[in-house]
Image (cartoon, rainbow, N blue to C red):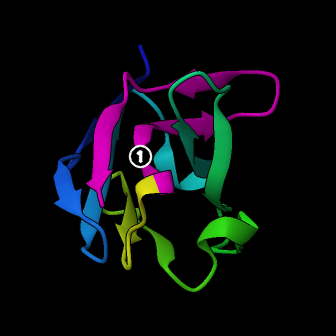
């Protein structure tokens, strides 16, 4: 059974930093792309950053230059380093594993950025 468990969410002031982690179990981690999605209050879940199995990264324009996605295949973990946080970054951050026809999600971790 594939499981994704996020951690690292917190309440932080604008301009601060956080690092989110997502540990994957029950799957061959290195073979698949991983992503971080944000669900803001009243909005649909939206892609924040993605990293392919080969390490190629893509970011939403709103976070370019502030967020960095990375992965450690030895630890089955994907990270999201967030800097210069803004109130609009507030939301539940979900980790995603893209296996083509099937996607797996974690339960999410709450990030709240106060102004």
What residue does disc 1 label?
90
The total number of labels drawn is: 1
- Residue displayed at 41% across by 26% down: 106
Q: Nearer the viewer, residue 44 or 100?
A: 44
Q: Position of residue 71 (x, y in %)?
A: 44, 66
**Quarter of the figure with residue 2:** top left
Q: Which residues are magenta?
A: 88-115
Residue at the extreme right of the image, as rendered: 101
**Quarter of the figure with residue 107:** top left
In the picture, measured across the screen, residue 9 lies left or right of residue 28, that is left
Residue 49 visible from this viewpoint: yes
Residue 75 visible from this viewpoint: no
Q: Position of residue 97 (x, y in %)?
A: 58, 37
What kind of element bears circle 1? Answer: loop
In the picture, measured across the screen, residue 44 lies left or right of residue 78, that is right
The answer to if 8 sits in the magenta stretch is no
Q: Nearer the viewer, residue 108 or 97?
A: 108
Q: Nearer the viewer, residue 112 or 35?
A: 112
Instruction: Give the main secondary structure, helix, strand or loop, of the magenta stretch.
Output: strand
Q: Position of residue 92 (x, y in %)?
A: 41, 34
Q: Position of residue 84 (x, y in %)?
A: 38, 79
- Figure quadrant of the N terminus: top left
Q: Nearer the viewer, residue 85 or 105?
A: 85
The answer to if 93 sits in the magenta stretch is yes
Residue at the extreme bottom of the image, as rendered: 65
């Amino acid at each position: 059974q594939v499981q994704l468990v996020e951690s690292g969410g917190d309440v932080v002031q604008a301009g601060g930093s956080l690092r989110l982690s997502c540990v994957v179990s029950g799957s061959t981690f290195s073979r698949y792309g991983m992503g971080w999605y944000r669900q803001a209050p009243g909005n649909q879940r939206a892609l924040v950053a993605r990293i392919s199995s080969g390490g190629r990264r893509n970011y939403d324009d709103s976070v370019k230059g502030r967020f960095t996605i990375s992965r450690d295949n030895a630890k089955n973990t994907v990270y999201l380093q967030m800097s210069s946080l803004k109130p609009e970054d507030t939301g539940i951050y979900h980790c995603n594993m893209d296996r083509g026809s099937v996607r797996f999600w974690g339960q999410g971790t709450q990030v709240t950025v106060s102004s």
